[in-house]
Amino acid sequence: MKSYQGELQLEAPLETVWKFVTDPNRIGASMPDLVAYTVQDPHHLMAKVRAGVGPVRAVLDMAIELNGDVAARTAQMTVQGSGMGNGVQMQTTMSLTAPNDQEPDTALHWQASVTVSGALAALGSRVLDNQVKKITEKVFENIRQGIAESVTI
């Protein structure tokens, strides 16, 4: 298992960021290399994404669960993915902070633990680690872009 973390500084009110990170439609659309997604209920969605490391490529079926604690300003995203003999598990925690709930600035701190199995994992830890880090960071960059677009609409 590898762990990654980061922080996004967003020019958006905390409430706008909270609604985004707990909305399965918004999170589904934020998945990198998305083929398709379907929202099942307010906390669950299924997605198909392309994944690859070096010459090994696969389309993974991803079950994604979103949960949040409004009072603690934390949201969790759990991802279970599989396809073509490969597996991915990701547990992410996002915490939001803002100097003032009325200010249009929010910090989104994230931490993700990722485990990859199958042919993708057999490619070597250095290659795999770099690709998993890149994909994980892309999820949060897509979230940042989505929030920025929702503020300007």
Image: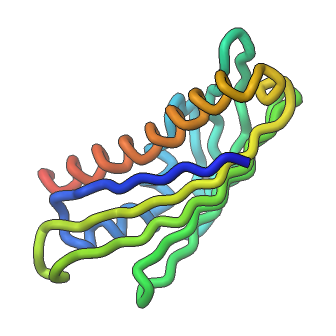
Q: Is residue 124 left or right of residue 3?
A: right
**Depth check: 144 or 25 in front?**
144
Whether residue 40 is visible here, answered yes or no, is no
| Residue 132 sits above or below residue 111 on the image | above
**Depth check: 44 or 7 in front?**
7
Q: Is residue 63 left or right of residue 16?
A: right
Q: Looking at the rendering, which quadrant does residue 109 occupy?
A: bottom left
Q: Is residue 56 left or right of residue 91?
A: right
- Furthest residue in direction bottom, as rendered: 71
Q: Looking at the rendering, which quadrant does residue 102 occupy?
A: bottom left
The location of residue 41, given as percent across then percent down, is 60, 66
Q: Give the total of numbered labels.
A: 0
The location of residue 100, given as percent across then percent down, is 16, 82
Q: Residue at x 36, y 69 (%)?
A: 19
- Furthest residue in direction front, as rendered: 126
Q: Is residue 153 left or right of residue 146?
A: left
Q: Residue at x 57, y 73 (%)?
A: 67
| Residue 98 sits above or below residue 77 on the image | below
The colour scheme used here is rainbow
Whether residue 138 is visible here, answered yes or no, is yes
| Residue 149 sits above or below residue 130 on the image | below
Q: Residue at x 57, y 28 (%)?
A: 130
The location of residue 149, given as percent across then percent down, is 21, 47
The location of residue 79, given as percent across then percent down, is 67, 53
Q: Residue at x 42, y 71 (%)?
A: 95
